[in-house]
Amino acid sequence: PAWVAGGRTITPTAIVLHWWDGWGGGHDINRLVATLNGNVTNYDPALTSSQPHPAVGHTTVQIGILGDGKAYQLTPKLNTFARHAKCANDWAIGIEIEGFGPGQAHYIGDNQVQFNDVVKVVKYLMGLYHIKAENVVAKNGKSGRGIVSHQQVDEQCQWADGAPAGTGKVDVDPAYLGRVLKAVGG
């Protein structure tokens, strides 16, 4: 598993929301885990854009929330380091939400049961780690606070030389993020 490297933990200042472009109607946790284990990441914040980027581990995420609203903790501890959003891995807990973006079948914004449970999990994490209902990502992506989207982190993420390191992630969409922020008091 990706977290074996020393059992590293983080001090979370934010929660990053993702969707995983999949749908199993609440029966797809094994697909999420298999997909994560199959995706290799090469982001090392110490590297510049011109250096070779060897694989540094598999992608992971702390929590997966299925279409039926069931939440699964996927790391040994909620603050276990996980590779889910390049620059945010050192400062944020990631939540993968089963479903798709706007205009597609199984859009996460259309699933009220799942949304309610996303809000419950976010509120729980906010209380546990003293995370405020705000939305801040630093210009270089190396820090953030509150509840943010993978899209926001990706837009700001940089290599050590300041070159963009993002790949154009679009999850979660601004409307869904706004609804979550409003529901948690932002």
Image: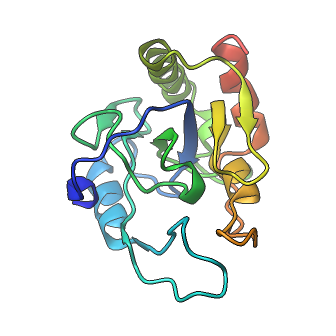
Instruction: Give the quadrant of the C terminus.
Output: top right
Q: Is 27 placed left or right of 124 in the picture?
A: left
Instruction: Give the quadrant of the N terminus.
Output: bottom left
The image quadrant that residue 166 belongs to is: bottom right
The image quadrant that residue 160 belongs to is: bottom right
| Residue in the image at 29% along x and 36% along y | 73
Residue 54 vertical placement versus 36 (above, below): below
| Image coordinates for residue 173, horizontal then vertical, percent | 73, 45
| Residue in the image at 66% along x and 25% along y | 180
Residue 41 vertical placement versus 4 (above, below): below
| Image coordinates for residue 113, horizontal then vertical, percent | 50, 24
| Residue in the image at 65% along x and 37% along y | 144
Residue 16 vertical placement versus 124 (above, below): below
| Image coordinates for residue 9, horizontal then vertical, percent | 33, 40
| Residue in the image at 56% along x and 75% along y | 47
| Image coordinates for residue 122, horizontal then vertical, percent | 51, 23
Residue 110 vertical placement versus 123 (above, below): below
Foreground residue, 170 or 6? 6
